[in-house]
Image: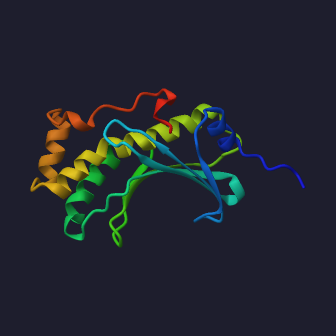
Amino acid sequence: MAEEIDPIGDYLASKNVGFQTTEGGAHGYKTHSFHFTGKSINIIECAIEFAEEGRVFTVYGMVNNKVPKEKFLEVLKVINEANLSTGYGTMVLNMSDGNFWARNTHAAANDVDPSVYDAMIIHVCDLIDRIYPLIMKIIYSEKSAEEVIANWKSGSDKSSDSPISSDISGYQ
């Protein structure tokens, strides 16, 4: 039996990232799970899920907070604005349980320069880290999505406009 190739696992190990690998996963192949530290969030739960027998991978950045059903519409407005403002990846709100996350997919896990793995992880974590404070303002205040978005766009909301630096220090 040939030795399995795992360039993303090798990359994470080379950066001394503590990660766990689960066989199977949501897409039937395997998942690498680890944590990342953002500027607004102490722990961003990350997962890299593989599909198509390892040829396609998706990076997820998630938090444990859930959006209450009565805030779905307002939070969806913020998530829509986030999706419009990002060049890569997508934010998602699960309308059945209130979980939200960011994700980005690439179609060639084995033929990618390792800097692409790092860029995708940082981009997904940056997206969730920038938008998380806006979502929390919707959940825990009486502010409307329009007000939160306007403050964010005008720069008067400094809590969510600084990107994560591109160095490896965010990995845990």
> What color scheme is it?
rainbow
User: Going by the image, does 115 lie left or right of 67?
Assistant: right
User: Going by the image, does 52 lie left or right of 78?
Assistant: right
163 and 56: which one is in front? 163
User: Going by the image, does 143 lie left or right of 60?
Assistant: left
117 and 141: which one is in front? 141
Query: Residue 166 at x, y = what percent?
Result: 46, 28
54 and 20: which one is in front? 20
Query: Residue 10 at x, y = what percent?
Result: 69, 39
Figure check: 37 above or below 93: above
All told, the count of numbered labels is 0
Figure check: 115 above or below 25: above
Write down the quadrant of residue 157 in the picture: top left
What residue is rendered at 27% in x and 49% in y? Answer: 81
Figure check: 34 above or below 51: above
User: Going by the image, does 138 lie left or right of 121?
Assistant: left
Residue 87 visible? The answer is no
The residue positioned farthest toward the bottom in the image shown: 96
Residue 137 visible? The answer is yes
| Quadrant in which the N terminus appears | bottom right
What residue is rendered at 44% in x and 44% in y? Answer: 124
Query: Residue 77 at x, y = what percent?
Result: 23, 56
Query: Residue 71 at x, y = what percent?
Result: 20, 64
The residue positioned farthest toward the left in the image shown: 142
What residue is rendered at 23% in x and 36% in y? Answer: 159
